[in-house]
C-alpha cells in the first residue's frame, strides 16, 4: 500500500527559483554542508577500523530489513513485556489517529516533542493542533522553524537555512507576543539561552512527550534516540505520557547489531565519533524508579515502506537519516531543502518521495533535481546506490507515461541521431545554422523544443564554427592515421 507525504503545491520552477534567489539560504546551507563534509573526512582519517565497522553496519541493516516479518512481532512482544503498549499503523492517517486518540482519552493539553522526521512525514503536529493541543518542538533547530512556520530544510540541521540575524528576529517577535524579555544581542549564546528559558516551562508542564526513534532493538524492546542536545532526556522523563513514533525500517534484531551501527549517523552526518546524547527507552517507570513516564506507547509506522521490500529499491530502507548525501549534493547546496517540496530532501528525498507514495506526489524530482554526479553514492555509509536508483526512477517515469509524449519522442530522435557518427555530425551542422536565431553577444540565450528548459537558468557558448572532426578532415595530410 502506497504511503502519503506532505508536498509543496508550488511548481519545481517556483521552488527552484525561490531557492536560487535566497542568498542568505545559499550561504548558510553552503557553510553548514561544507563543515559537515569536512568533519566526515577528518573523523575517518587514521581510523582504519571504520571500513570494517561500516561493512558490519550495512550487513546488520540489510539483515534486519530481510527479516522484518520476524522482527516486527518480536519487538512488539518485548516492548509489551516491559509494560509498554504497541500499535502498528499502515499509513500516516492511522498513525496520527492513534496518537490523537491517546492524547484525547488521557486529557492531554500540552505536548513536547523531540526531533523526528517521521512525525514531519505524517504531519502529526498539524493534527494535534487541530484538536486544540499545544505542541512545542524542543530541538533547537526544530523550535526555530516552528516559530517561522516552516518545515525542515536539512535532515540533521532543520534550521540550516536561517542566519543568526533571522533567528534573532524570530525570537524577538516571539518575545514581544508573549510580553517577555527578548534576546539582548545577536550572538549565538544569547539566542540559545532565550530558547532554553522558553522551553523550560514547556518541559515542566507538558502532559505528553513525543519522540521518534533512530533504531529499535527487537531483542531487548529498546528504542534508541541519538541527539546532540539534552532535550530528549527531558521529553522522555518529565511528562506522564510518552509516545514514540518509529518507522518499521528502524528495527534491528540484536543489541550487538546496534553496536555495529550506533556510530554511523554521527560520523557520517556531522563528523563526530558519537553523538552527544544517546537515549534508550525500555518501558514506562517501574517500581523503584524515580523518573520516567507513567505510560509508554510505541507506534510503528509503515506508510509505504513494505512496498519496497523484495524490490530493486529495498536498500533504500537502510537509510539511517545521517544526511551525508545532502552534504555533498551540489544541487542541494544551490537550491536548499525547501526546493524539493518534500519532507525528505536531497538525493535520498529524490528517491524516497516517489517510491513511498507510488508517484502520487512530486514525480518530477528524479528528473529535475539531480545531475547524477554520483557524489551521494560515494558518501552514503549504508551503500545505498542512490545514483543508480535515480536513473531507474527516470526510466520508470517513462514507463508510467509521466513524461509528455513530445519529450519522449524528442529524446528518442536525439538518441537515434547521435547513435552514428554521421547523424551526430549532421545534427551539429543543423544546430550551427539554427543557433543564429538565439545568439546574443556571443552567447546562446534560448533554444527550441525540449532544449528550451536548459536556458531558463543559464546561458551557454555557441557551437563552434568548426568542429575538430571538420578541422581534421580539412587539414590532415597524406591520408588517415
Image (cartoon, helix red, strand yellow):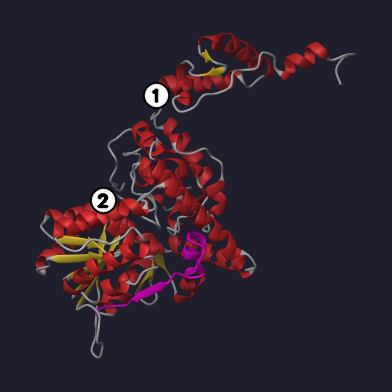
Is residue 12 placed above or below 464 in the rendered structure? Answer: below
Q: Quadrant of the C terminus?
A: top right
- In reply to whether residue 18 is colored magenta, the answer given is no
Asked which secondary structure carries label 1, the reply is: loop
In depth, the one of 27 and 302 nearer the eye is: 27
Residue drawn where x is 52% and y is 21% of the image: 412
Q: Are marks 1 and 2 in contact (CB under 8 Å)?
A: no
The answer to whether 278 appears left or right of 169 in the picture is right
Residue drawn where x is 82% and y is 13% of the image: 475
Residue drawn where x is 50% and y is 57% of the image: 36
Which label sits in the foreground, 1 or 2? 2
Q: Check disc 1 and report the residue beneath it.
A: 404
In depth, the one of 148 and 70 nearer the eye is: 148
The answer to whether 64 appears left or right of 241 in the picture is right
Q: Position of residue 301 (x, y in %)?
A: 30, 59
Residue furthest toward the front?
A: 184
Q: Quadrant of residue 235?
A: bottom left
Q: Which one is earlier in the sequence, the residue at label 1 or at label 2?
A: 2
Q: Which residues are magenta?
A: 261-284
Q: Position of residue 401 (x, y in %)?
A: 39, 28
The answer to whether 274 appears left or right of 294 in the picture is right
Residue drawn where x is 19% and y is 74% of the image: 204
Q: For marks 1 and 2, give the CA distance.
A: 38 Å
Is residue 353 placed above or below 421 in the rendered structure? Answer: below
Q: Check disc 2 and report the residue beneath it.
A: 148
In depth, the one of 359 and 238 nearer the eye is: 238
Q: Residues within 10 Å of mark 1 (few under 14, many from 20)?
A: few
Amino acid at each position: 500500500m502506497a504511503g502519503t507525504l506532505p508536498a509543496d503545491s508550488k511548481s519545481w520552477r517556483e521552488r527552484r527559483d525561490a531557492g536560487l534567489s535566497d542568498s542568505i539560504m545559499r550561504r548558510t546551507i553552503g557553510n553548514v554542508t561544507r563543515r559537515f563534509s569536512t568533519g566526515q573526512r577528518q573523523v575517518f582519517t587514521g581510523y582504519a577500523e571504520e571500513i570494517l565497522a561500516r561493512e558490519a553496519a550495512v550487513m546488520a541493516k540489510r539483515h534486519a530489513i530481510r527479516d522484518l516479518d520476524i522482527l516486527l512481532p518480536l519487538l512488539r512482544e518485548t516492548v509489551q513485556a516491559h509494560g509498554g503498549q504497541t500499535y502498528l499503523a499502515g499509513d500516516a492517517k492511522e498513525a496520527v489517529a492513534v496518537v490523537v486518540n491517546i492524547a484525547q482519552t488521557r486529557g492531554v493539553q500540552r505536548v513536547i516533542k523531540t526531533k523526528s522526521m517521521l512525525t514531519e512525514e505524517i504531519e502529526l503536529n498539524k493534527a494535534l493542533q487541530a484538536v486544540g493541543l499545544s505542541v512545542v518542538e524542543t530541538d533547537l533547530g526544530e523550535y526555530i522553524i516552528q516559530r517561522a512556520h516552516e518545515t525542515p530544510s536539512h535532515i540533521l540541521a532543520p534550521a540550516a537555512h536561517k542566519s543568526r540575524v533571522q533567528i534573532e528576529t524570530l525570537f524577538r517577535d516571539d518575545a514581544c507576543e508573549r510580553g517577555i524579555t527578548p534576546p539582548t544581542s545577536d550572538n549565538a549564546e544569547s539566542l540559545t539561552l532565550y530558547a532554553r528559558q522558553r522551553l523550560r516551562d514547556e518541559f515542566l508542564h507538558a502532559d505528553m512527550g513525543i519522540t521518534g526513534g533512530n533504531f529499535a532493538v527487537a531483542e531487548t524492546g529498546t528504542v534508541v534516540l541519538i541527539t546532540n542536545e539534552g532535550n530528549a532526556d527531558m521529553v522522555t522523563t518529565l511528562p506522564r505520557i510518552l509516545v514514540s513514533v518509529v518507522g518499521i525500517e528502524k528495527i534491528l534484531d540484536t543489541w550487538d547489531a546496534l553496536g555495529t551501527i550506533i556510530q554511523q549517523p554521527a560520523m557520517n552526518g556531522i563528523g563526530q565519533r558519537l553523538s552527544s546524547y544517546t537515549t534508550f527507552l525500555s518501558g514506562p517507570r517501574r517500581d523503584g524508579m524515580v523518573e520516567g513516564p507513567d505510560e509508554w506507547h510505541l507506534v510503528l509506522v509503515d506508510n509505504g515502506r513494505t512496498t519496497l521490500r523484495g524490490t530493486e529499491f529495498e536498500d533504500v530502507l537502510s537509510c539511517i537519516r545521517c544526511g551525508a548525501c545532502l552534504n555533498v549534493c551540489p544541487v542541494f547546496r544551490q537550491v536548499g531543502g525547501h526546493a524539493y517540496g518534500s519532507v525528505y530532501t536531497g538525493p535520498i528525498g529524490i528517491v524516497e518521495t516517489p517510491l513511498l507514495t507510488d508517484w502520487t506526489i512530486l514525480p518530477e524530482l528524479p528528473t529535475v533535481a539531480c545531475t547524477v554526479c554520483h557524489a551521494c553514492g560515494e558518501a552514503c555509509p549504508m551503500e545505498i546506490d542512490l545514483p543508480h536508483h535515480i536513473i531507474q526512477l527516470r526510466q520508470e517515469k517513462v514507463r508510467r507515461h509521466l513524461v509528455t509524449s513530445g519529450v519522449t519522442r524528442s529524446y528518442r530522435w536525439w538518441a537515434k541521431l547521435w547513435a552514428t557518427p554521421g547523424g551526430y555530425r549532421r545534427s551539429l551542422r543543423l544546430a550551427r545554422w539554427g543557433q543564429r536565431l538565439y545568439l546574443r553577444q556571443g552567447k546562446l540565450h534560448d533554444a527550441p523544443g525540449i532544449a528550451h528548459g536548459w536556458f531558463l537558468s543559464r546561458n551557454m557558448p555557441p557551437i563552434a564554427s568548426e568542429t575538430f572532426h571538420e578541422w581534421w578532415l580539412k587539414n590532415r595530410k597524406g591520408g588517415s592515421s
